[in-house]
Image (cartoon, rainbow, N blue to C red):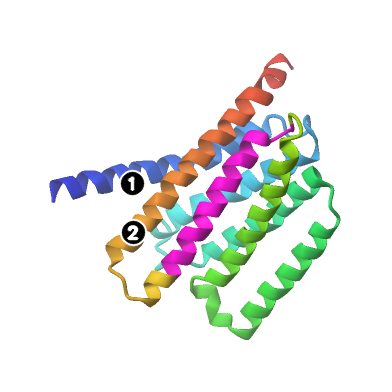
Amino acid sequence: MEEATLLDSFITVIRSITIFGSVVLFIIYATGLFKFGKAYRAFTIYLFSVGIIQLLSKYGISELEWESNLFLSHYYFISQFILLSWFYKVLLHHQWIWIVLLATLGFLIYQYVEDPAMYYRYNPMGMVITQVILVFYSLLYLYRCLAGNQIFMITNIGLFFYLLSSTLIFASGNLVLNLDVPPDFIRLLININLFLYLAFQILILVEWWKNYSKTIFRA
């Protein structure tokens, strides 16, 4: 029982680190918002949206007394899809990314119009579809990076592994919910995703420190 309590406390600390880390990463990247081009700006705005949603998720229940913050997951994966599509559009220079974006958003809108109650539930299909598309973009850019040093290569590697793993975890999470697997296993999947996100945040910080910090400090 004591070990379980210690583990829960450790997970709580890591979760708090990722939440406040999201805000810190935005602040760090915001220092170069108008210095490093469109891809940098797109990614910085993505960090801003993640930071806002993370803070709302933490304080919505503890301070605002929400019964559930599950509805924020819709804002998270949709804003992530829009902003990272913009990010990869700049990096890859493919116009068809806009077409894929609009078509996918059209499908998501249809989902919520057809079933408005989904707003208060987890949407595994929407989550998986948007993240699979982003994984594909990341893979395309990873292939391009092999030809030479490219901007945001470290971040792209982090995005690829985090989104791929997260997609598999959330898809599995939906499956185990349907199979009535014990909550401890679902909690394990969520915790694995938490640590993967922390690793992704570290790579984002490494990207900034290696490729952008010196320019900002010299300014």
**Crowding at mark 1 (Cα within 10 Å: few <14, some 14-19, many 20+):** few
What residue would you read off at disc 2?
187
Nearest the viewer among 104 and 40 is: 104
Residue visible at 63% across and 85% down in the picture: 114
The image quadrant of residue 77 is bottom right
Q: Amino acid at mark 2?
A: Arg
Is residue 135 highlighted in magenta? no
Q: Amino acid at mark 1?
A: Thr
Residue corresponding to mark 1? 12
Which of 108/49 is in front?
108
SS at mark 2 in the image: helix
Mark earlier in primary sequence (1, 2):
1
Q: Position of residue 147 (x, y in %)?
A: 76, 34
Crowding near the residue tagged with mark 2, few <14, some 14–19, many ≥20 C-alpha atoms within 10 Å: few
Q: Residue furthest left?
A: 1
Q: Which residues are magenta?
A: 150-174
Task: Quarter of the image for the C terminus: give it.
Answer: top right
